[in-house]
Image (cartoon, rainbow, N blue to C red):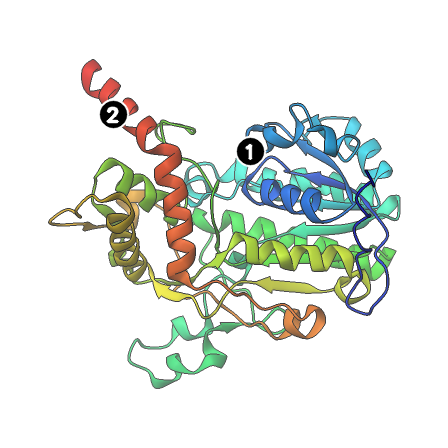
Amino acid sequence: MSSPSPAPARMDLDGNPVAPLTICMIGAGGFIGSHLCEKLMAETAHVVLAVDVYCDKIRHLVDPAPPHLAGRISFHRLNIKNDSRLEGLIKMADLTINLAAICTPADYNTRPLDTIYSNFIDALPVVKYCSENNKRLIHFSTCEVYGKTVGSFLPKDHPLRKEPEFYVLKEDESPCIFGPIVKQRWSYACAKQLIERLIFAEGAENGLEFTIVRPFNWIGPRMDFIPGVDGPSEGVPRVLACFSNNLLRGEPLKLVDGGQSQRTFVYIKDAIEAVVLMIENPGRANGHIFNVGNPNNEVTVRELAQMMTEVYANLSGEAPLDEPMIDVSSSQFYGEGYDDSDKRIPDMTIINKQLGWNPKTPLKDLLETTLTYQHKTYKEAVKRQMSQASASS
């Protein structure tokens, strides 16, 4: 019996073969990291040094690694804050991808110090080791570095608010506008912007090869957590996981300040395609900041809640509540000191020009995929958790 023929060599966008890389992936056990690990293991010959404190979301890849992945992926349990092994792992790799962050809005307000340390101070050694050892870095930032749009400072009925130049966010042109210092919510965005500036400066002064990624609401299976099931009971995950939690529990969806903020959402598998293009096309990606989002999937948070309620009712067979949504103030939901941006709509010119990437998945399709996963994975666990809570009360 003849052995299977080897997979064809991967080619970059310029028609050159892609040599297998060793990638140090910090934060590999999280939502984005788990999907990126799966993609790299399934479709490339790259080797991954998976660095994280937890490996639950990649356990199927590393504990133990399946025979066909032997030597391809290894898990390194360490906290980048204080572990001397970090530099050694970066030295072993051709490329470091830093996904590690505190990135939950409720934490920005209630744990601003941890947020700043996690997103700036803890990232400093990663940048330093990459620069000193001439290693390429792909650093994950956030769309929140843009802060508020220019248009948000105009009167609500001003016609210029509808002009794209007043709200569409461009990597190399849009200003980063944050709220006052007393609004702790901006602790995250400020920390992320400062580490971006440091990385950019390392590139300019010391020749660091870098790419910065600004995700715009990446959505899909395994994102965030369900409070009391696979996360803290008092935790407040991001909007889609918050709404999923409400739907699983048969509770009204809570709309902060009426749910008038506008957001875009992109499917995780589409976004991961963009990251692989960055990995395998350094000549096109180095020195660039990339928005990665889907401007076609723009909705208000209220519209998102309505869509999720309809999709969940169809897939679960459970009728929606008579009052499926309730309004709450931001101070009630997040605490005092919360602030927000009105719109986050990415301009896609640079990533399309450099990498030829465009998102594919419509919002309804990605909601159906994500909510189907949430229902299958969590519904019974949520029922048990609610029963236990009711019995003990």
Give the x, y percent position of residue 102. 53, 40
The residue under the point 21% across, 40% down is 251
| Number of disc labels | 2
Q: Tell me whether circle 1 and circle 2 mark residues in contact (CB < 8 Å).
A: no
Give the x, y percent position of residue 202. 80, 55
Question: Mark 1 is on which residue type?
Answer: Lys
Give the x, y percent position of residue 137. 76, 50
The residue under the point 42% across, 75% down is 151
Residue 237 visible in the shown view:
no
Say above or below: 152 vs 223: below
In the image, taking residue 239 as reference, residue 324 lies left or right, namely: left
In the image, taking residue 180 as reference, residue 92 lies left or right, namely: right
Question: Mark 2 is on which residue type?
Answer: Met
Q: Label 1 vs label 2: CA separation?
A: 24 Å
Q: Which residue position holds label 2? A: 386
Quadrant of the drawing holding the N terminus: top right
Say above or below: 220 vs 261: above
* Secondary structure under the numbered disc 1 in the rendered image: helix
In the image, taking residue 336 as reference, residue 81 lies left or right, namely: right
Furthest residue toward bottom? 159
Q: Which residue position holds label 1? A: 57
Within the image, what quadrant is residue 180 found in?
Answer: bottom left
Give the x, y percent position of residue 321. 15, 46
In the image, taking residue 365 as reference, residue 268 lies left or right, namely: right
Residue 179 visible in the shown view:
yes
